[in-house]
Image (tube, rainbow, N blue to C red):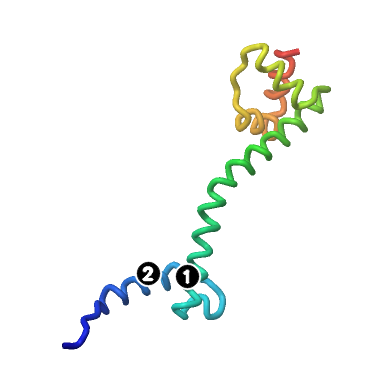
């Protein structure tokens, strides 16, 4: 008796991977073995970088707050310490946005804590 193979499922699995590889360069987009490896690696990168994105944005916010605080004669750590001491609960994302796009509002926050 011949062995039974499920070609329908195999084809669907391969089509799914080839579809995910759309836009890749060269054989990575249409050769099954190459595309499978490329898509697997891309998924690993996307999983890792969804976590790294949070770190990257926090570092960006801290840099922007530091630049804004130094314009008013404070370092980042002094600024954040005084915010805590004065019970002002603005997160880094909001503070960075103020420092970047609304300097007069950021200045008002600095004046409030000095």
Residue at 21 percent of width and 81 percent of height: 4
Residue at 67 percent of width and 17 percent of height: 83
User: What residue occupies the far left of the structure in this picture?
Assistant: 1
**At which x and y percent is residue 37?**
50, 71
Label 1: state its secondary structure. Answer: loop
**At which x and y percent is residue 40?**
48, 65
2 vs 41, nearest the viewer: 2
Q: Is residue 28 left or right of residue 1?
A: right
Label 2: state its secondary structure. Answer: helix
Q: Are marks 1 and 2 in contact (CB under 8 Å)?
A: no
In primary-sequence order, the first of circles 1 and 2 is 2
Q: Toward which corner of the image does residue 85 lie, by quadrant?
A: top right
The residue carrying mark 2 is 16
Mark 1 neighbour class, 10 Å CA radius: few under 14, some 14 to 19, many 20 or more = many
Residue at 63 percent of width and 30 percent of height: 92
Mark 2 neighbour class, 10 Å CA radius: few under 14, some 14 to 19, many 20 or more = few
Image position of 114 with respect to 23: above or below = above
Q: Toward which corner of the image does residue 12 lie, by quadrant?
A: bottom left
Image position of 109 with respect to 25: above or below = above
Point out which mark residue 10 bears. none
Residue at 53 percent of width and 64 percent of height: 41
Image position of 80 with respect to 18: above or below = above
**At which x and y percent is residue 104?**
71, 24
User: What residue occupies the far bottom of the structure in this picture?
Assistant: 1
44 vs 108, nearest the viewer: 44
Q: Quadrant of the N terminus?
A: bottom left
**At which x and y percent is residue 34?**
50, 76
13 vs 72, nearest the viewer: 13
Q: Is residue 10 left or right of residue 20?
A: left
Q: Quadrant of the C terminus?
A: top right
The residue carrying mark 1 is 21
């Amino acid at each position: 008796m011949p062995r039974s193979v499920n070609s329908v499922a195999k084809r669907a699995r391969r089509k799914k991977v080839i579809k995910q590889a759309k836009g890749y360069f060269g054989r990575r987009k249409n050769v099954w073995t190459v595309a499978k490896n490329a898509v697997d690696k891309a998924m690993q990168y996307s999983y890792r970088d969804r976590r790294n994105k949070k770190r990257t944005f926090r570092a960006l916010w801290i840099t922007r707050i530091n630049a804004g605080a130094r314009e008013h004669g404070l370092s980042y750590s002094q600024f954040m310490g005084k915010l805590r001491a004065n019970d002002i609960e603005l997160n880094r994302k909001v503070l960075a946005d103020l420092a970047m796009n609304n300097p007069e509002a950021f200045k008002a926050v600095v004046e409030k804590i000095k």
